[in-house]
Amino acid sequence: MIKDKEIYDAVYQYMSLKSIGPVQTNKVLNTVSEPIEPYCLKSQLKKSLNSNLQIEFEKAPSVLANLNSKFDVGFLLLTNENYPKELKKCLSTNTPPILSYVGNIELLKKCKVAFSGSRKVSEKGIDITKDCVVQLIEKDVSIVSGYAAGVDFEAHYGALSNGGSTIIILPEGINSFRIKREMKKVWDWNRVLVISEFKPDDPWKASRAMGRNNTIIGLSDIIVVIEAGETGGSLDAGYKTLTMNKYLFVPQYGIVPESAKGNNLLIQKGAFPILRSAETQKANLSKMIKLLDSPKYELF
């Protein structure tokens, strides 16, 4: 474990340097042979830097020295066998080089549907979120979302309160994670996985929240945008989903709430509309479930 911690710390230290991002980090990681030894990794990382950055790298403080001790934090390096393959495939060179996590890592093996939407979601949007989540967990699908108010919260809470599983993708470092008071009564670490692509101490930033959307999309088989405004993060997540050739589903409202003004824009661009079944009066997810039942490689 000490050796592994040195490896993860070295990667975080490298990524803390000015102008070093995922592309450069992944380029170096892909030159290192498994099993990775700390000395060899540090040597390869250092060789890729100019002389000034080499000095900074050598002096860089430990990033993991203040790791949140309240949780048993694990790490996945890009080169690890159990690093999510769908994330590598979808994001390519921009794949997060290292993921920190808490909870049940086995949830990554399940089919995964992501939910995105307004923090100020309408009552109708909340009802649709709950309905869709219940139908999906009955099919043993794991629910993926951020950790914001609104749609994110309803998706996670709906999954856990109905016996399903959920994956939280943070817009900040793992050290900032806390179980929300409203979630504690339904929380079950066997059915929860929390993931961060950022350094453990990184605070929330709007740019990180937007960038984290790529990881939500890349990790998931299908994305549902419950409500998107005419601008903003949810609309951006919808457009990114279509650009990344992932399946996107969006509720089509009769009377469109202010918080869902962007829904029709996404449907016009190629999202599948979610309509209410005349027979069950629930969201008709037959198309979505059919796609999830198809071989994994056909999903993306």
Image (cartoon, helix red, strand yellow):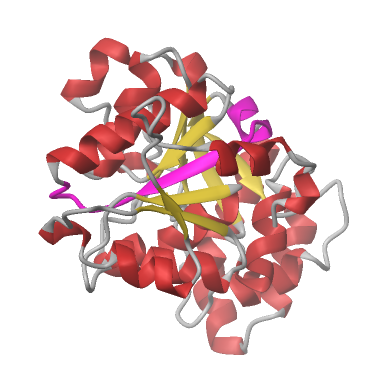
Most foreground residue, 201 or 159? 159
Most foreground residue, 201 or 233? 233
Q: In this view, does 57 lie above or below 81?
A: below
Can I make out residue 149 in this image?
no
* Identity of the residue drawn at 53% across and 30% down: 142
Q: Give the range drawn in magenta.
A: 105-121
Tell me where residue 265 appears, x and y as whole percent. Answer: 34, 72
* Identity of the residue drawn at 42% across and 59% down: 213
- State left or right for residue 70 relative to residue 14: left
The quarter of the displayed image where residue 208 is located: bottom left
**Is 119 in the magenta?**
yes
Q: Is residue 33 above or below residue 161?
A: below
* Identity of the residue drawn at 17% across and 47% down: 121
Q: In this view, does 115 lie above or below 281?
A: below
The quarter of the displayed image where residue 70 is located: top left
Give the position of the C terminus as an image quadrant. bottom right
Tell me where residue 86 appears, x and y as whole percent. Answer: 69, 52
Most foreground residue, 219 or 274? 274
Tell me where residue 152 appears, x and y as whole percent. Answer: 30, 41
Q: In this view, which residue lies farthest toward the front?
A: 278
- State left or right for residue 206 relative to residue 25: left
